[in-house]
Amino acid sequence: MQHIRRALLSVYDKTGIIDFARFLAEQNVELISTGGTWSVLSKAGLPVRQVQEITGFPEMLDGRVKTLHPAVHGGLLARRDQESHLRQIEEQGIQPIDIIVINLYPFENTVNAGASRSECIEQIDIGGPAMLRSAAKNHDAVVVVSDPADYDAVAAEIRDTGTTSLETRQRLAAKVFALTSHYDHAIAMYLAGDADAAASLPDHLLISESMRGQLRYGENPHQSAALYGDFFSDFEKLHGKELSYNNIVDIDAAAALIAEFSAPAAAIIKHTNPCGCATGEDLVAAYEQALATDTMSAFGGIIAFNREIDIRLAEKLNDMFSEVIMAPSFADDAMDILRRKKNRRLIRIRRGGGTPARMQMKSIGNGYLCQMADSAEEQVSSWKVVTRRQPGDAEMNAMRFAWSVAKHVKSNAIVYTDDHRTLGIGAGQMSRVDSSVIAVMKAGNAGLSLDGSVVASDAFFPFADGLLEAVRAGATAVIQPGGSVRDEEVIAAADEHNIAMVFTGTRHFKH
């Protein structure tokens, strides 16, 4: 690439543009600009021409058309090593453009600010992405700067050599195509609309999120990791160490579970599984009973609440080590106490925290699996009692509670509860019977009786043995989806032992 002689500048974000343009002018680079950018540079006393002088056409249609012209794109796309290209632009009186400095209309910010549809549509940039892509395609000969953060590095190279290296131009071109891809993705998602998007999975999977920061490592120290997207629009870190990959996964799981309850509730999460959950008259009562489910596993866990944490609760929380404490708010005196643990993270759950993503994705060897989130509201009215004995009101309330927890437990999931607290949880076993054995063992270790409890199973019992395990433990009612070819066998076993059983018709596998 030869020395830079001609620049086109057209930026919405004017950060640093005067200084960068002044530097270019000092290097004897001719400056060309559009509308608002031209006005800013002119007022700063810089020698700058308007783009309409180059195109011979005025800006049209309220600025919608100003750079979509061969005088601009010919100057960007002409190959400098091809005589026919150079001859053609010379015949048309077009001069090469060696560097462009462009950033785009703030479409996403406009949408996020709640602007009207017409305002959002007007913030769809057409000329900017077109010029960026033209220059990026021809990066062998054109420098394309789309981010004010790159001004200083580009200026340093030009100052030293009068031009830039191919390596730099290629890096900047890659950045442009990532930017325009993200920009188009945001527009596509907006135009598709939430209602239409929720109706079906997309024909083309579009994933485009900005990195919010590198993480120390992933699940294990040898795995690199980073956070993308708008996680911190739902959660705010108020205190403590940097969040780890595993912290973030557990925070998301804890918020989803605690969002199930309207009464004062506490949930303790370890490795995305609940190790205790309860509701109560207040948060202290809920926390004490959630903790009592499994005090050993709760150590070093994530503790979530759905009400403000007061000083009384804070004093109790300080008695046990926890990685993260989450709540919608913290009283000032409670914060004073909780901040005494310097490394423990305190997270404020913002409005929307705990709301599941509309679509869930999992990467696999050479592709992605996508599914709609398991967020459908439970239709209790459609639940069906399939046994001779009808559940009592207390049992029905307990089954509602158990079912709310079970959907957040890794499969195979077995959850024993009463009407407001977990008593034993078995998670992630290859056999549903093994999960039940573990849940009973956990309750025994905690000194909690399962006599009169209810049990929830996230999927059907394939054989009667799982139900009989619950009978031996002392459960009097069972809630499960149903749907096994041996349902009648399981129902008969329940009737034989005078167990009430409800089929929900909905499975809650969580792999």
Image (cartoon, helix red, strand yellow):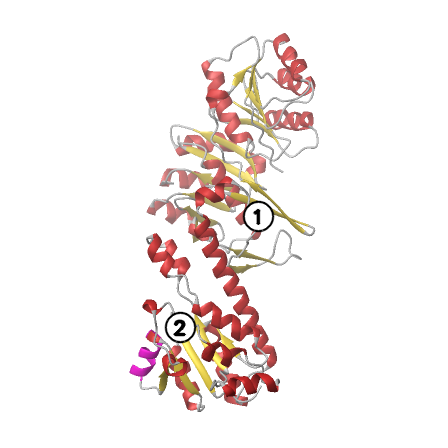
Residues at marks 2 and 1, CA–CA distance in whole angstroms: 34 Å
Relative to 372, is 64 above or below? below
Side (left or right) of 397 relative to 458: left
Check disc 2 and report the residue beneath it: 11
Relative to 244, is 451 above or below? above
Would you call the spot at circle 1 few (<14 residues within 10 Å), some (14-19), or many (20 or more)?
few
Q: Position of residue 333 (x, y in %)?
A: 34, 46
Residue depicted at x 58% and y 24%:
481
Which one is earlier in the sequence, the residue at label 2 or at label 1?
2
Q: Is 41 contained in the magenta span?
A: yes
Q: Is 106 contained in the magenta span?
A: no
Give the main secondary structure, helix, strand or loop, of the magenta stretch. Answer: helix
Q: Position of residue 234 (x, y in %)?
A: 43, 48
* Bounds of the magenta segment: 36-44
Q: Nearer the viewer, residue 62 or 233?
A: 62
Q: Amino acid at mark 2?
A: Val
Q: Nearer the viewer, residue 89 or 98?
A: 89
Can residue 358 be seen from the camera position used here?
Answer: yes
Q: For residue 167, which quarter of the picture?
A: bottom right
Q: Position of residue 1 (x, y in %)?
A: 58, 86
Q: Nearer the viewer, residue 298 or 45?
A: 45
Q: Position of residue 22 (x, y in %)?
A: 39, 85
Check disc 1 and report the residue beneath it: 203
Q: Amino acid at mark 1?
A: Asp
Looking at the image, the residue that sits furthest to the front is 91
Q: Nearer the viewer, residue 393 or 22?
A: 22
